Image (cartoon, helix red, strand yellow):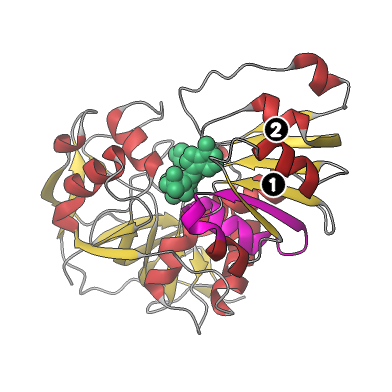
Amino acid sequence: MAIVADVPTDLPEQMYAALIRECGPPEVIGYDTMPVPQPGPTDVLVRVEAVSVNHVDTFVRSGAYETKRPFPFVVNRDLVGTVAACGAGVAGFAVGDRVWCNSLGHAGRQGAAAQYAVVPSDRLYPVPEQADSVTTVAVAHPAATAYLALHTHGRLRPGETVLIAGAAGHVGRAALALARDARIIATASAADLETCRQLGADVALDYRDPDLATRLHDAAPDGVDVHLDTSGHHDLDLATGVLAPRGRIVLMAGLGARPELPVGALYTRDAQIAGFAISTATTVELAAAAARINQLVADGSLTPRAVEHLPLSAAAQAHRRLETGAARGVRLILHPPA
Ligand SMILES: NC(=O)c1ccc[n+]([C@@H]2O[C@H](COP(=O)([O-])OP(=O)(O)OC[C@H]3O[C@@H](n4cnc5c(N)ncnc54)[C@H](OP(=O)(O)O)[C@@H]3O)[C@@H](O)[C@H]2O)c1
């Protein structure tokens, strides 16, 4: 791959950004100007087209998720846009390329919610030619999370049985697309069961059904190999009761949850519980997830449930809506001014 050193001279000096000067409630997010950041030798400067709003963005903003934040700190982590400039040591990207990233705004990196963002080149991926930019950024975070849950930490193998709890949610929906080589049991609200089946679930069950445990046993008589609960409501008795020998329970939601642990039933099955946060994924793990996401976005099998477009200046309102549950089923997408 050729080394490119693409640094146009017509970049503006200032840009608009959604930024915080301290942690706190959504209203600490200001809409302000700041200097356009300069890319380092292995960085890419991206002109941002769209930014998604994720639960983790609210945790980083509020301080609930501990990480290094250089103030003034640009919020949010996922963007899609076009390459505006490349550092001299960047290979594989050129000005004008459509690109996406899902790991800004963490561990000292500035966030994505601005007109321009600096992205380390090993955290940047091409948008497939056939793919829509907004679709790509809307699915990036939930789909990368689902990939890490199923494959990196759940070690799901083709033909195994996976239980996806919360399958109609953003992460759950992506997990349905990513687990297509497995036998999928989904749980969701009654109104979402048919959608879950259309998206690939072999069995879809109402999570409010009082007979759920019996129905799960009937659906998986040999047990569930990977149990993924995206809802954050962990019923580990239920999960362990239907777990196959050597089954894996993946924990990835419920920051404050303190479920009871059925110790004996777990160790006598040789079971494992694996937890993870996408924030701590390595660049190699994130790139593996991105490659698979790009395939599924390009072939149209990975789509968001619904998308709502907002101006970047509405970032505080978007955080508030996500936190209060007022954005149920919808991916909120922020657009910086052109
Ligand atoms: N660890 C990580 O790296 C990571 C990354 C991304 C997200 N997350 C976390 O993952 C969680 C899910 O995110 P999301 O965007 O997918 O949220 P979401 O769209 O709200 O999905 C959650 C789904 O769970 C369903 N649900 C609620 N209670 C349930 C229960 N008892 N059993 C089964 N399903 C139930 C909900 O259905 P109804 O609305 O119909 O009740 C909803 O469809 C969030 O807590 C988020 O913070 C973690």
* Number of other residues with Cα within 10 Å of mark 1, as a class: few under 14, some 14 to 19, many 20 or more: many
Q: Position of residue 308 (x, y in %)?
A: 28, 63
Residue 4 visible in the displayed image: yes
Q: Does residue 206 appear left or right of residue 158 in this picture? A: left
Q: Position of residue 311 (x, y in %)?
A: 17, 62
* Number of other residues with Cα within 10 Å of mark 2, as a class: few under 14, some 14 to 19, many 20 or more: many
What's the residue at 58%, 41% (across, down)?
209
> Given contact means CB atoms under 8 Å apart, are the residues at marks 1 and 2 in contact?
yes
What's the residue at 14%, 37% (across, down)?
27
SS for tag 1? strand
Amino acid type at image mark 2: Ala
Tag of residue 239? 2
SS for tag 2? helix
Q: Position of residue 58 (x, y in %)?
A: 32, 38
Q: Residue furthest bottom?
A: 130
Q: Does residue 61 appear left or right of residue 302 in this picture? A: left
- Magenta span includes 192: yes
Q: Nearer the viewer, residue 227 or 273?
A: 227
What's the residue at 85%, 58% (across, down)?
159
Q: Which residue is mark 1?
A: 163
Q: CA distance from mark 1 to mark 2?
A: 9 Å
Q: Does residue 29 appear left or right of residue 2 in this picture? A: left
What's the residue at 20%, 29% (across, down)?
22
Is the CB of mark 2 within 8 Å of ligand 1?
A: no
Q: Is residue 234 above or below residue 292?
A: above
Range of the magenta residues? 168-193
Residue 87 visible in the displayed image: no
Name which of mark 1 and mark 2 comes first in the sequence.
1
Q: Quadrant of the N terminus?
A: bottom right
Amino acid type at image mark 1: Leu
